[in-house]
Image (tube, rainbow, N blue to C red):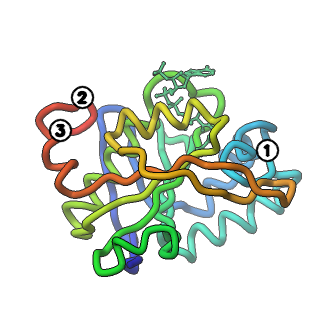
Amino acid sequence: MNKPIDITGVELFTARLYLREWRESDLKDFYEYASVEGVGEMAGWRHHGSIEESKEILDKFISGKKTFCIDLDGKAVGSVGVEEYDEALFPEYADKPGRRIGYVLSKDYWGQGLMPEAVAAVIQYLFEMEELDFLNCGHYEFNTRSRRVIEKCGFEFVKNAEFKTVSGTSAPTREYILTREKYISMIEESAYYA
Ligand SMILES: CC(C)(COP(=O)(O)OP(=O)(O)OC[C@H]1O[C@@H](n2cnc3c(N)ncnc32)[C@H](O)[C@@H]1OP(=O)(O)O)[C@@H](O)C(=O)NCCC(=O)NCCS
């Protein structure tokens, strides 16, 4: 089952990143990366066509209280959302608290291992502070970059599914689960978990 999440006041620190709530003053940075074609499209949303569109989404991030801003040296360069997972897709977890993680990073910063670092911090927070039992994550079959983030964070492939695309059609996705047990066993092994 989806556990309600509220990240108000939560701050997470990694070797290079500061994860925090979104602020109205992040608008320019947000529009800068969200308006680049080929970024949001990999996560199921169309790149933003105007700063007003970014402002609308930013307001939702702020009021929704479930989306972290990835802050790199004072600049907002991405987001990690603690989304609701599809309960119909995972009936076996009906009596366990869980959520789904989604993320996007500014194209300017791809390939430096920043997202695995950010996602690992959110995973740690969700298991240790929110006491979730499992996390779900997924990617379009064609999104091999996201697949690598998911694998590096220790998620295990469970099943194929479908997810809507920006053009209104649906595309095959690969769905993964990270259990609390697997997380605990990874703490000593993985470079991303302290
Ligand atoms: C997926 C994403 C978050 C990866 O973040 P990241 O910080 O670059 O992750 P990593 O540095 O660990 O790189 C992941 C993989 O991307 C590939 N990659 C790295 N740099 C790249 C670049 N400049 N161009 C293309 N691919 C690159 C590599 O295969 C890498 O895997 P490897 O470490 O095994 O070689 C980022 O590409 C992104 O925001 N994409 C658009 C949104 C998206 O796909 N969101 C997820 C939806 S499910």
The CB of the residue at mark 1 lies under 8 Å from ligand 1: no
Between disc 2 and disc 1, whose residue precedes? 1
Above or below, comparing residue 150 to residue 69 in the picture: above
Please name which of the two marks, 2 or 1, marks the residue nearer to the observer: 2
x 58%, y 39%: residue: 105
Residue position marked by numbered label 1 in the rendering: 35
Question: Which of 149/26 is in front?
Answer: 149
Seen as rendered, the residue at the extreme top is 111
Give the image location of residue 194, x and y in percent. 17, 38
Question: Which of 42/55 is in front?
Answer: 42
Name the quadrant where ligand 1 sits. Answer: top right
x 83%, y 57%: residue: 169
Residue 144 lies in quadrant: top right
Label 2 amino acid? Ala
| Residue 77 placement, left or right of 112 | right
Distance in Å between CA atoms under marks 3 and 2: 7 Å
Question: Which of 39/27 is in front?
Answer: 39
Give the image location of residue 87, x and y in percent. 48, 75
Residues marked 2 and 1 touching at CB (< 8 Å): no
The numbered dot on residue 191 is 2
Residue position marked by numbered label 3 in the rendering: 194
Question: Which of 15/185 is in front?
Answer: 185
Please name which of the two marks, 3 or 1, marks the residue nearer to the observer: 3
Label 3 amino acid? Ala
Give the image location of residue 188, x and y in percent. 11, 35
The numbered dot on residue 110 is none
| Residue 129 placement, left or right of 139 | left
Residue 135 lies in quadrant: bottom left
Distance in Å between CA atoms under marks 2 and 1: 32 Å
For the N terminus, give its image quadrant.
Answer: bottom left
Distance in Å between CA atoms under marks 3 and 1: 34 Å
Element on which disc 1 rests = loop
